[in-house]
Image: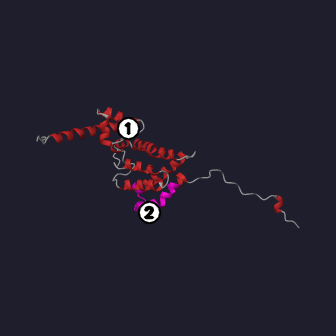
Amino acid sequence: MTEHSPSARPGRWRSGAESRQRILEAARTLFREHGYGGTTVRAVAAQAGVDPAMVFYFFKTKQGVFAAATEMPPHLPPAIESIFTGGLDGIGERIIRTLLENLDKSSRTPLVMLTRSAPTHEASEALLREFIDREITSRLAAMLDTPDAALRAGMVNVQILGLAVARYIVRIEPIASASTDELVARLGPVVQQCLTVATNTSPATPPMIAGAGDMISTT
């Protein structure tokens, strides 16, 4: 039986590793120049000089390319997808649990993930905001059949970004050391309310002012 030479596998490995690195460098450049929405897998492949199939082979999806290019935890894009699989029932708890379980696994804080893909923190944060808007906020809004869907989804962003900053960046206690289950139990219903509880936005009815006749006692 013919055997492969010992150098065959390392050679193929080096070729694959080099292609993967070219894809990542191309993705970082394109995400920086064109943003998340303006960058496609085909454009990344063309920039890297590879077939689009190779991009999908290494990274599965555009979200996977973005995660790898920005050093986001690789398990985060699939976790984000799982938020939307169960409809609106229980989505508040799923959002908080997904955020905590995945960021707890990461040694990198959420706003630092992008610093190597853009020259300044401002550009990094803008790219992160665009990713959140397209992959989370817009999809949440699309699930709601309300005229204030965008506002409701934006209120969810306030909750999850505030939690991320408090727990992972500023490390405010007791939020920083609280268990995932406790935070899910307390904040999940808050997020659920932002999305599904009906709100009354009409101005409050002013109290009735007694008429002059009511104020005159009869004898």
121 and 12: which is toward the camera: 12
Q: How is the image coloured?
A: secondary structure
Q: Residue furthest right?
A: 219
Would residue 12 be seen by someone viewing this image from the given angle?
A: yes
Q: Type of residue at label 1?
A: Arg
Give coordinates of residue 77: x percent, y percent. 38, 47
In the picture, residue 10 is in which quadrant?
top left
Q: Which residue is mark 1?
A: 32
Q: Residues within 10 Å of mark 1 (few under 14, many from 20)?
A: some
86 and 179: which is toward the camera: 86
28 and 123: which is toward the camera: 28
Q: Residue furthest bottom?
A: 219
Give coordinates of residue 112: x percent, y percent. 37, 48
Q: Which residues are magenta?
A: 167-192
Residue at left offset 30%, top offset 40%: 57
- In terms of secondary structure, what is the magenta stretch mainly? helix
Quarter holding the C terminus is: bottom right
Q: Is residue 217 left or right of residue 68?
A: right
Residue at mark 2 to residue at mark 1: CA–CA distance: 38 Å
Using the image, tell me which numbered label, if any, was put on residue 182: 2
Camera-nearest label, 2 or 1: 2
Q: Is residue 84 left or right of residue 152?
A: left
Q: Residue furthest left?
A: 1
Using the image, tell me which numbered label, if any, was put on residue 71: none
32 and 143: which is toward the camera: 143
Q: Secondary structure at mark 2?
A: helix
Q: Type of residue at label 2?
A: Glu
**Residue 185: in magenta span:** yes
In the picture, residue 97 is in which quadrant?
bottom left
**Residue 77: in magenta span:** no
Disc on the earlier residue, 2 or 1: 1
